[in-house]
Amino acid sequence: MEDLSRFKQTYFEESAELLAIAEAGLLRLAPGEVDMDEVNAIFRAVHSIKGGGGAFGFTDLVAFAHEFETVMDGVRNSDIPVTTPLVDTLIRANDLLAQLLAYAREEGEVPAGLTDDTVAALRRIQQNRGAAPAPAPAAAPAASAAPAALPDEEDAEAGIFGDALAAINAARAEQEPPADPAALPEDTAEPGRLRWTIVFRPRGDLLMSGNEPAFMLRALKRLGEAEITCHLDRLPSLQNLEAEQLYLSWTVTLLTDPAVGRDRIEDVFEFVADECDIAITVETPPAPAAMPAGPDAAAPVAVTDPVPAPATAAASSAAATSAATSAGVPAAKPAEPGAGKSGGARPGGNGGADHAGITNHTIRVDLDKIDRLVNMVGEMVITQAMIAEHVRELPQGQFQELLEGLEQLAQHTRELRESVMSIRAQPVSSVFSRMPRLVRECAAATAKEVQLVTSGETTEVDKTVVENLVDPLTHMIRNSIDHGLEPPDERERIGKPRAGTVHLSAQHRSGRIVIEVTDDGRGINRPKVLSKAIEKGLVQPGASLTDEEIDNLIFLPGFSTADQVSNLSGRGVGMDVVRRNITSLGGRIGVYSTPGEGSRFVLSLPLTLAVLDGMVISVGEERFVLPLTNIVESLRPKPADLHGLVGKCEVMMARGDYVRLVHLHALFGIPGAERDATRGLVVLVETEDGSRLGLVVDEVLGQQQVVIKSLEANFRRLDGVAAATILGDGRVALILDVAGLREMSRHTDPQDDAPRDRSAGAVLAPPPAALPAPRQRETV
Amino acid sequence: MEPSVKKKVLTVDDSRTMRDMVAFTLKNAGYEVVEASDGQQALSVVAANKVDLVITDLNMPVMDGLTLIRRLRATPAHRTTPILMLTTEADESKKMEGRSAGATGWIVKPFNPDKLISVVQKVCG
């Protein structure tokens, strides 16, 4: 049974892939531009899901897939024209197929009537199909006009693989051929047994279809006790004998259990019924053996196990058959089958299938294995850092080779880490490909015309990040269509094309992935947003906010500008949830809007959730890690470069720009740190939006790969801190979140997570963490 | 009695589930199995392996089953190699097409493992 579940597992995995292929194909399917390769791919997907489903006895699924497949068959034969309603029905059918697969997987009861409407729609399409099926091109398999038959009752019970496996073994135990296959004395026929007489006269070209009479005769022998007589009456003289022709015929007398019916015998000749004369007669009581019906019957020749001969090509084996027959011995192919002999089942065989000639470019690996690998690499990075730490304390000038070796180890560790990370990387196309359908649905629900443009689908990012993009993107696109785009008539009035455009793009930028959702709609209605925010108590009346601040109000919890609750929005999921999802991945979201021209939502996310390149810095006795991607440079300012501003803020002149300084010791309350920036160091950092900050630190200790350990999972979220790590000496160091530090330094008192309505204008959401929490259980 | 030489069967199907099940059934019955996921691949497998039997699906990408059967029959080495087609279409027209392309016989999906083995024995022992 373990094996059965393994097949089921494969089946469900494969079906999920096939469903995705079918859906993508259906979404591209449109009247007037039918790509037959795509149609065939959709057909094959449904066909394979049906085929596998039959093997496991998923009757509901098979019945439904059958209707779906029949319509697809009509489409691929051009009997059924591609129309928008047809595509809609097919997309619905694909959804239902996915649902039925889910029920099959969970072994749940399919709700009655679930598929009724769609089946009715599919049948209507089948009834209206083109009267004259187009002739299929010669090269392509002509599909049958009649739908594929469902497995009939007889097959259905055998269709369940598990039962059948037991049957294999049981049957194999019974398939012991008689020890002596020579002619049977008649008196061995017991009462109650059936005596069959089978006269088998094949046509001369029977061998050309790959059929081999010797195997059929052997199959007959498995049904009971057989006496086989070979007739040589048609055998020509040697010079007229053609090697590939068959000149023999046989009479078989077969004693069987009453349980063996005529169908079992006819089955043996199933493939050659059209290429031979065959007569099957039966008599119940044992009687004197009927004389062979063949003319001038020759001496009976018993089929015996052939002498093993060197394997030869099939063609010469055919020749051997006829040549051997002239010697009066029906030849057989050299090797004996393993089945039908004792000692049959060897579970799994020897696994020695020779795959030469198959080039397989991908393998499937369980995610757990990769995660283990990622974790191990993480530990290795820490160990490597620890060794490096100790080596630094060794006397200078000695241990040159050790140092070089370590240098190499560091290099290899880095490459290993990158390789492992790239295994988990996936193109965002798997998420982007779901969006056309969403747009289609939203457009229909809001009666708007929408065109979706995507770019950068091949941009790769960690699997976890990809998976977590689905919800935020779904909501952002809904939001763009629902709130951003104007109805077609209104667009026309203001001189825009009737169809609005939503552009979804992905790109790598400074070690992160940036995803943008842009629409060419009306933009954010700032007066409305502001009055709404005041009404909801999110902003003090009379507060003066910049445009950017107003735009960002839409991310506050409980904020919704929809006048009525539409089908799309107002589900209790607002942009605040989107922001929270993104933040939990270590990402950030921002919005840029121009009234009348549209809005642009920008997401930026880390590429991976496990390791980062960081710079270790010291402040007093504490160590911190700054993500390398944020660091511009570090410098020691001269007193002339520093300027105090009103309040506590201090700025520094760096490369012709003023940069605000942030004293980490002050922010984190660390005693014994360097307070004077001219005696410490200033690390110049940059956030994704390009704003710069100078962090005042004691020392920069060096660059290091660090393994990210979630602070939230092990402790709790802290402002200005993205995560934690373990340094080479075993100490825990906090990984700083630059954007978070900027927010903290703006408000001298650290804020909590609640939306702030205390101070006018302070409407910024809590600083997002710059780095994600790795989704692994870890103990620090 | 163990066979001295295992018969080698090539199973051709674009469905991994199907290939797995056919392979499993055949291996349990003492056959050696090689696999291919479309007709084109199958041709390169038979070029590199001597196979005693080919079991092929009909609907496949790149090269479908009927084309594969014709191509094999056009190769001298495979003029009489047994070829079984796996088909869910129990209707005669598919079978006839397969026959005229040169198939030895057919197996109707979903297959019963017993039946599969008995059909395989019937055509290649």
Image: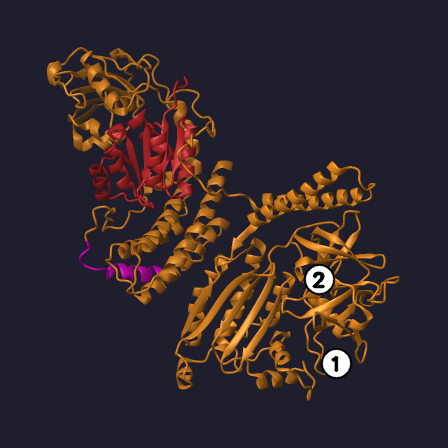
* Mark 2 belongs to chain: A
Which residue is at the front of the view, A160 or A774?
A774
What residue range appears in magenta? A118-134
Residue lying at 71% horizontally and 51% vertically, measured from the top left: A704
Residue lying at 19% horizontally and 55% vertically, measured from the top left: A134
Q: Chain A is drawn in which colour?
A: orange
* Mark 1 belongs to chain: A
Horizontal and vertical percent position of residue A626: 72, 59
Q: Which callout, 2 or 1, points at the residue further toward the start of the chain?
A: 2
Tell me, yes or no, if residue A85 can be seen here: yes
User: What residue would you read off at disc 2?
Assistant: A633
Side of A231 where A570 appears, left or right: right
Tell me the crowding category of disc 1: few under 14, some 14 to 19, or many 20 or more residues within 10 angstroms, Cα based: few
Q: Colour of chain B?
A: red
Task: Identify the amino acid type marked 2.
Answer: Glu
Cα distance, mark 2 to mark 1? 37 Å
Residue lying at 31% horizontally and 60% vertically, measured from the top left: A122
